[in-house]
Image (spheres, grey):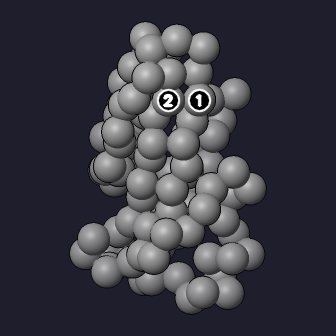
Amino acid sequence: MSDRLTDDEIQAQLPAAWDRDGDEIVRTFEFESYLEGVGFASAAGGLAEEAFHHPEMTIGWREVEVRLTTHDAGGITQKDIDLAERFDELAE
């Protein structure tokens, strides 16, 4: 199990496009088309499965909202920060 990050650690490490929402970090990725968003969600799901760390993802019209938290730690851990960075790289 990963240890929860402190508020200061979260603030220092949170990727620029992500926001904190309580015990989660969240980002909405925007795309040119619905299917581009679906493709991103599918690829992000593959990365999540590889990391064995599964986000909440909501697919909307030309956007995908991603929420990360570590349930067994009861909050935000390094696993969340690391996966957020991988999702950012995927979206570039």
Residue occupying the point 53% across, 82% down = 5
Secondary structure under the numbered disc 1 in the rendered image: strand
Q: Amino acid at mark 1?
A: Glu
Disc 1 residue crowd, few under 14, some 14–19, many 20+, Cα 10 Å: some
Asked if the residues shown at circle 2 and circle 1 are in contact, with their CB atoms under 8 angstroms apart, the answer is yes
Quadrant of res 10: bottom right
Q: Quadrant of the C terminus?
A: top right
Task: Indicate which disc, 2 or 1, sits on the residue closer to the N terminus.
Answer: 1
Lateral position of residue 32 relative to residue 39, left or right: right
Residue 27: percent from the left, percent from the top?
55, 49
The answer to whether residue 15 is above or below residue 28 is below
Q: Amino acid at mark 2?
A: Glu
Residue occupying the point 74% across, 56% down = 16
Residue 66: percent from the left, percent from the top?
44, 46
* Image disc number at residue 67: none
Residue 40: percent from the left, percent from the top?
47, 24
Lateral position of residue 22 relative to residue 54, left or right: right
Find disc 1 in the rendering and name its residue.
Answer: 30
Q: Residue 46: in sight, yes or no?
A: yes
Find disc 2 in the rendering and name its residue.
Answer: 63
Closer-to-camera residue (54/31): 31
Lateral position of residue 4 relative to residue 59, left or right: right
Q: Residue 50: in sight, yes or no?
A: no
Disc 2 residue crowd, few under 14, some 14–19, many 20+, Cα 10 Å: many
The answer to whether residue 46 is above or below residue 38 is below
